[in-house]
Image (cartoon, rainbow, N blue to C red):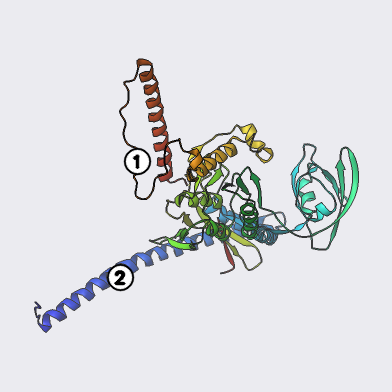
Amino acid sequence: MYRKITLGAAITLAIMFSTVTFITTWIYSAKSFNSTLFNIRERETMYAKIKEVDDLVRQQYYNTIDEDFLGESLVRGYVAGIEDPYASYLTAEQYAETQSDFAGRMVDIGVVCSQSPDGYIHIDQVYEDSPAALSELQAGDLIVKVDDLNVSTENYLEATDALRGEPGTTVTLLVRRDNVDKSHTVTRRRVEVPTVSGRMIGDAGYIRITEFNDATPDQFQNTLDELLNSGAKSLVFDVRNNPGGTIDSVGKILDVLLPEGPIVSATYRNSTEPQVLLTSDANEIDLPMAVLINGKSASDAELFAQALKDYNKAKAVGTTTYGKGSMQEVHKLSDGSALVFTVALYNPPTSPNFEGIGVKPDYEVRMSAELEKQLENLDENSDPQLKKALEVVAGLVKDLAPVEESDRPSGTQAPTEESSTEAPLEEEPEPSEEDSSDDLEEEDLTEEETQEDSSEESDDETPSDDDESESAA
């Protein structure tokens, strides 16, 4: 039943509603205006102080001021002042190098280097089909001279920088192998950095991902296809010591593995709800999986592991990860330099953000500091974490395997749709004292296993951590 109101009452209600709306909007606007006004006053005070310092120094400073260095130092000081642990200022050269890193390509000879105890350039790895490989350089070689520069502890960084250059240019290296020096002239070119490698270990496919850049998804897909074609019945992913990379690259890889649903969302400044950044389609890899993690697995590597856990696609093995759940953007400035700073916190599909917390393993397996240093040289026989991961996926494969007729006890039949799958209860004989003791021990073990399982399940529920712009994590 409808009730009529007078025109005057309707007008009064409309005025009251408009007044409340106006007052609410005015209060919010006033707060926003006051905050903006405060920020403007703070900035004016800061600029005035910088001008005061600049005027004083220019009037009385005895030495000559390097204007370029002073300008860059001011920017670096500003970045340090915002107290963002992941913020940085990049020169034009550093920005160009960062872009190459994101792309997964660089212009050099195609080696991974470290400093030897004598200060020389030690070749740790030679990329396949790289200029260094074509020049027959090998892991373990020492580069003792780059063009006319004798490599030493004092000029090591300068020497490694000299390995880079424009495509098509050459660099002459004096390489020491088995105490014999030999000269090599190597032509620089663009080299795709390998970030994914894989192999079969029994019937399990093992895939190691060292970082996530623009080249990683294609490398991952090629490696995955090779392992599946080789008959892999399970997959073990290794993101230990992986520092992360770009959100887009890890998203493309997770899209291959996960069912339909969100992959990652981000919570931006002043936002009330997370914004979904990437989603997965319905295609997925339906195999038992495990993922290896440690304290140096950070950012996108943590998202990779937690996303697999959120969808119950994989068990995590190793130790708790670094705990970096924030997203940075790279903003190019007008002079070619760039700023990197945090713009959001990002969230796994269903778990909370893991900033400062990390991703917890389902199976914690610790390694000694000495073993961790040798991680690159360990295999399934010497790596306790990898060994455990292989055990986990082997158990999952066994659980999924159908029971063969030959495996059934004689006199039993496979259950049909019409028959019950539950075995009938039988009367058990009275246990002897010895049997009772054994049973108690088995019950104690069962209780301990149940507590361990509960602990593992609890770990799953606990959070484990343009302008030209690009997002990085």
Rendered residue at 64%/43% (across/down): 201
Q: Can residue 55 be seen in this view?
A: no
Residue 74 picture quarter: bottom right
Mark 1 — residue? Answer: 422
Toward the viewer: 462 or 54?
A: 462
Image quarter (top left, top right, bottom left or bottom right) of the N terminus? bottom left
Residue 451 is tagged as: none
What type is the residue that disc 1 sits on?
Glu
Q: Residues within 10 Å of mark 1 (few under 14, many from 20)?
A: few
Q: Residue 451 at what x, y percent from top left?
A: 39, 33
Q: Are marks 1 and 2 in contact (CB under 8 Å)?
A: no
Mark 2 — residue? Answer: 25
Rendered residue at 59%/37% (across/down): 387
> Of all residues shown, which one is farthest toward the bottom?
7
Toward the viewer: 299 or 45?
A: 299
- Judge depth for marks 1 and 2 and give the one in front: 1
Going from N to C along the chain, the mark reached first, 1 or 2, is 2
Q: Residues within 10 Å of mark 2 (few under 14, many from 20)?
A: few
Q: Can residue 116 be seen in this view?
A: yes
Image quarter (top left, top right, bottom left or bottom right) of the C terminus? bottom right
The answer to whether residue 113 is left or right of residue 410 is right
C-alpha span from label 1 to label 2 = 67 Å
Q: Is residue 248 above or below residue 210?
A: below
> Of all residues shown, which one is farthest toward the top?
433
Toward the viewer: 321 or 19?
A: 321
What type is the residue that disc 2 sits on?
Thr
**SS at mark 2?**
helix
